[in-house]
Every structure is written in C-alpha cells, then in structure tokens.
Amino acid sequence: MITDDTSPNARKVYFQRLVETTPAERVRIGVGLWEAAHALQWAAARCKCPDANDAEITFQIAVSRFGVELAKRAYKKP
C-alpha cells in the first residue's frame, strides 16, 4: 500500500526546486546530510560505549556501515 501525504502543489514546488538546483548546491546538500548523519551515528556510538576512545568509536562506526569482516580488514584487527 502506497501512502501519499504530499499535496500535488507541494510536489510541483519540490520538483521545480530540484530542476533549479545547481550541481554544486546538490553536492552541498548531500555533504550536509552526510555530516549530520555521521554526527548522529558518532553520538549514538559514544552513548553506547562512553569509555571508548575515538579510534574504537571510529571502528564501531565502520562495523555498522561496512560489516565486521571489512571493518576488521580495513583497521587491521584480528
């Protein structure tokens, strides 16, 4: 079941804005969204492991993003 809570007028404005957005603006928006998500993930990992150092938090984030096997290989962990 597909729900649609966006009015036709709002959808029109949204797509018009997308057409008007430059590639640089799109990249800037994407970077901003990535930074916000990263900050939230970092804060969640810090809450979960308050005594962990920055390297361990970074590793835990890598595990959540890429899986244990790839994170261990990337960070040279046994």
Image (tube, rainbow, N blue to C red):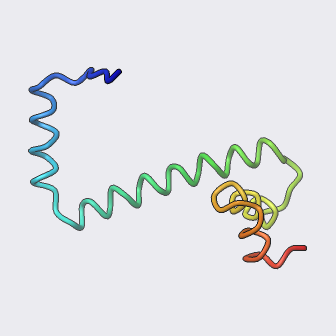
Residue 45 in the image: state x and y as whole percent.
Answer: 74, 48
Quadrant of the image occupied by residue 54: bottom right
- Image point 69% across, 57% down: which residue? 61
Residue 37 in the image: state x and y as whole percent.
Answer: 53, 49
41 or 7: which is nearer to us?
7
77 or 50: which is nearer to us?
77
Q: Is residue 51 above or below residue 58?
A: above
**Which quadrant does the N terminus fall into?**
top left
Q: Is residue 32 above or below residue 40?
A: below
**Which quadrant does the C terminus fall into?**
bottom right
78 or 49: which is nearer to us?
78
2 or 57: which is nearer to us?
2
Quadrant of the image occupied by residue 30: bottom left
Residue 20 in the image: state x and y as whole percent.
Answer: 10, 54
* Residue reaching furthest to the front: 1
- Image point 27% across, 20% down: which residue? 5
From the viewer's perspective, tell me whether residue 30 is left or right of residue 66.
Answer: left
Residue 3 in the image: state x and y as whole percent.
Answer: 31, 21
From the viewer's perspective, tell me whether residue 54 is left or right of residue 34.
Answer: right
- Image point 86% across, 56% down: which residue? 52
Q: Is residue 23 above or below residue 50?
A: below
Figure disc tally: 0
